[in-house]
Amino acid sequence: MPTRFPKRLNVDDFATMNRRSVLRGLGAGALLTATGSLFSRSAWGNPVFTTYPFALGVASGDPAPDGFVIWTKISPRPLERGGGMPKKPVEVEWLIASDERMQKSVQKGKAIAHPELGHAVHVEISGLEPSRDYFYQFAIGGERSAVGRARTFPRIGAPLAQLRFGVAGCQRYEAGFYTAYRRIAEERFDFVFHYGDYIYEYPTLRPGGKTPWPVIRVMPDEPGEIFTLDDYRHRYAMYKLDRDLQAAHASTPFIVSFDDHEVVNDWAGESTVKQMPRELFMLRRAAAFQAWYEHMPLRRAQMPKGPDILAYRRLLIGDLLTLNVLDTRQYRTGTSCGGRVMAGCAEALEPHRTMLGDTQERWLYDSFKTPGARWTLLAQQIPIMRQDRNPDPNIFGPSMDKWDGTVAARDRLFAAVEQSKLRNLVVVDGDVHFNCAGELKKNFDDEKSATLGVDFTATSITSLGDGFDTDNRFNILMQQDPHIKFYNRQRGYVRHVVTPARWQADFQVLDKVSVPDGRMSTRKSFVVENGVSRLADA
């Protein structure tokens, strides 16, 4: 790994650590490999920090054949308002190298960390070679960040023998330890797709409160439910102080999306199930989007404009994969029947309902008509496959917050796939806090209906606690939905290994997240062969 992290840090201790303790904890060898000549002094009066200014780590994202985004946030006291920084811009230096000791410099430059963006830094690197590892580091006022690893994509259309990536999300802080992220860091993936729920906006939980699972970690000095920009910034700081999460970000580029909890539970378009006045909700959405942008490795194209953000985008990876990152929150019709799990919701069947909005639908469906890579991936937030959540065989009870709540939108998607004769469609998503694998049927009521693709749903990193393997309820639900081949409610992530001949998905699960070092194992593996849109056991 480019950076060695300690086994565990107490957040309370970390918030008051001095510089020497932080350097020792992060591994001075990794931080101080670059010579002083590689970084010049900061333009802002050579600031001296009493605490380490890169407390929230480093990250990279959205790779291209010639580069990627690198990110950090200058925050010497991350749990204080303003992160312990003055309200003025500061100059940050960055370095790209071809070795993790940072001795073979490839590029270097300077960026400005603006107070308007919470002193976050987003540098879009270009001019690099395709299909290779690079390493990056930041410096300010004599201080150096951890070293991160990034990897460029192959040239568009170039032959690619194999691609390895992870899918993860839903990481409520109080619910458990981020051991899954430590394992992701060890994978050295080509990238990780984070489907959302990076933070939770809920009031923080305390031991002894009303919760169906134990409170494993307590967030100190946190407010109740978050509403303002400062609230959202503070919540991200709490999450990003976690060493395992920092290790995952430093290990590989993240391609990030958001789901509902980055803003508020089950929000849809310009409304929420809480019936908040639209004007107030849009103010809150603007604050949430700004905080999300500030803390994620995103390009300038994703910088929010008030309550609006362009989060859907397409990445082309050699001749192997067309990756479509979708936004299933911002443009959808208001959630059917309040987003509940229920039977007989007439709103779900209304033909005008949309999940992606007209513009995003056209953008996606037009791409199906153009010959592209071997595999087409829809990387999004919520399951597309039909899922009966009611074990009573006489009652079909889906969740109205998922694609089951916009049946017409799913029908349009499937029609576009069929009309364009799109082969090798794979969908990845999360949100529901359980692992699931299923086939996308043209008609879910007919088991013999054409299969248009496959859907792999990743469980949570921690949300809802330890969980369990499976139970009789899941077995009954699979009998009611025979297109679903697997259910599991442990925590972890999904590893995807893609070649021209086949796609393999490995469901990696932990026995516990209530302890710091849960045991990781492969619970189930599925294979999809090229040209055969069906699931088979690996």
Image: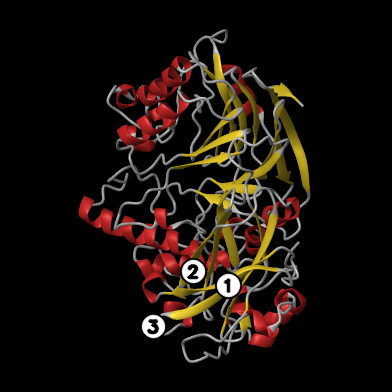
Quadrant containing the C terminus is top right
Gap between marks 3 and 2, in whole Å? Answer: 14 Å
Count of marks, rendered view:
3
Q: Secondary structure at mark 2?
A: strand
Q: Which residue is mark 1?
A: 94
The spot of residue 476 in percent (x, y) is 61, 22
- N-terminal of the two: label 2 or label 1? 1
Gap between marks 3 and 1, in whole Å? Answer: 19 Å
Residue type at numbered disc 2: Val
- N-terminal of the two: label 3 or label 1? 3
The spot of residue 447 in percent (x, y) is 56, 10
Confirm or deny contact between disc 2 and disc 1 (CB under 8 A). yes
Gap between marks 2 and 1, in whole Å? Answer: 10 Å
* Location of residue 252 by image quarter: bottom right
Q: Which residue is mark 3?
A: 88
Look at 38% across and 29% down and name the residue there: 405
Residue type at numbered disc 1: Trp
Depth check: 90 or 381 in front?
90
Q: Which residue is mark 2?
A: 121
Depth check: 474 or 74 in front?
74
Is residue 357 in view from this perspective? no
**Residue 335 horizontal side relative to residue 530, left or right:** left
- N-terminal of the two: label 3 or label 2? 3
